[in-house]
Amino acid sequence: MQHEILQPGAFAMLKVHLEAGETIKAESDAMLSMTSNIKLESKMEGGLFGGLKRSILGGESMFFQTLTAEGAAGQVILAPAIPGDLVAHQLNGHDLMIQTGGFLAAEPGVNIDTKMQSLGKGFFSGAGLFVVKASGVGTIFLNAFGALYTVELQAGEEYIVDNGHIVAWDSSVSYTMQKAAPGLWTSMTSGEMLVCKFTGPGKIYLQSRNPGSFGAWMSRLLPAQG
């Protein structure tokens, strides 16, 4: 499947070229525009249980858009709900863990499910108790809040990430939670507190903006209620 990331950066879009009969599935409401021969449908991958699990537990849409080129080749342009960059990741039978809101679209060979993390990771990692698990074979497209930065870890290599900046990570990468600094007071006053320590091998995708910090900044600008 041929694709192009348009306007890479803060307001990126994904243009996908579909040959006749080819299909791409995308997050609900992701379609920006399409040629007239594209058939748009709404489907629940994994049936009712799978859709409910993604929606209630994973915080994702219950339904996917499926877009199919009928009779001839066609084009689709997709855009995420949040301002930020896009990246294409190739799955070859391994799993990719994605934070809520990080999935944009995928080829049909990619299965999208929900996975539960441990309670400690769920509450403090920034990724949530339930994360999206992508598996199978094909290309998956991720979106970030802000710019995307990719880190490739070698076996045994460690890397520290602030817990609000995680987008996705290979299932071959493990991580633990720890204080940002050796002392509790320094960790608290630095504004970091807890961070994630990832251990390779595999890729980590990071975003330049922290949604929680941005929300707190925005709330200070809003007029007081009542």
Image: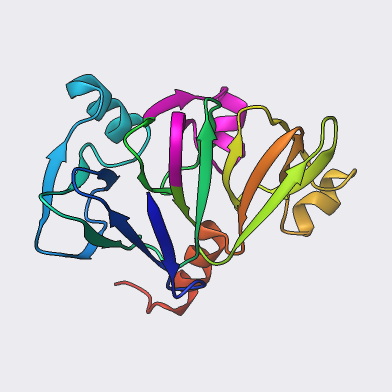
The picture quadrant where one finds residue 6 is bottom left
**In magenta segment, residue 100:** no
Give the image location of residue 100, x and y in percent. Answer: 43, 43
Residue 152 position in % (x across, y down): 73, 45
Q: Residue at x 19, y 43 (%)?
A: 21
Please count the marks in the image.
0
Which quadrant of the rendered structure holds the C terminus?
bottom left
- As drawn, is 173 to the left or to the right of 210? right
Work out which residue is located at the far right of the displayed protein and give it.
Answer: 182
Magenta range: 112-140
Q: Is residue 125 magenta?
A: yes
Q: Is residue 111 visible?
A: yes
Residue under the point 13% across and 41% down: 42
> What x and y, as percent, mark residue 160?
78, 46
Residue 43 horizontal side relative to residue 145, left or right: left
Using the image, determine if residue 134 lies above or below residue 100: above
In the image, 17 versus 177, the foreground residue is 17
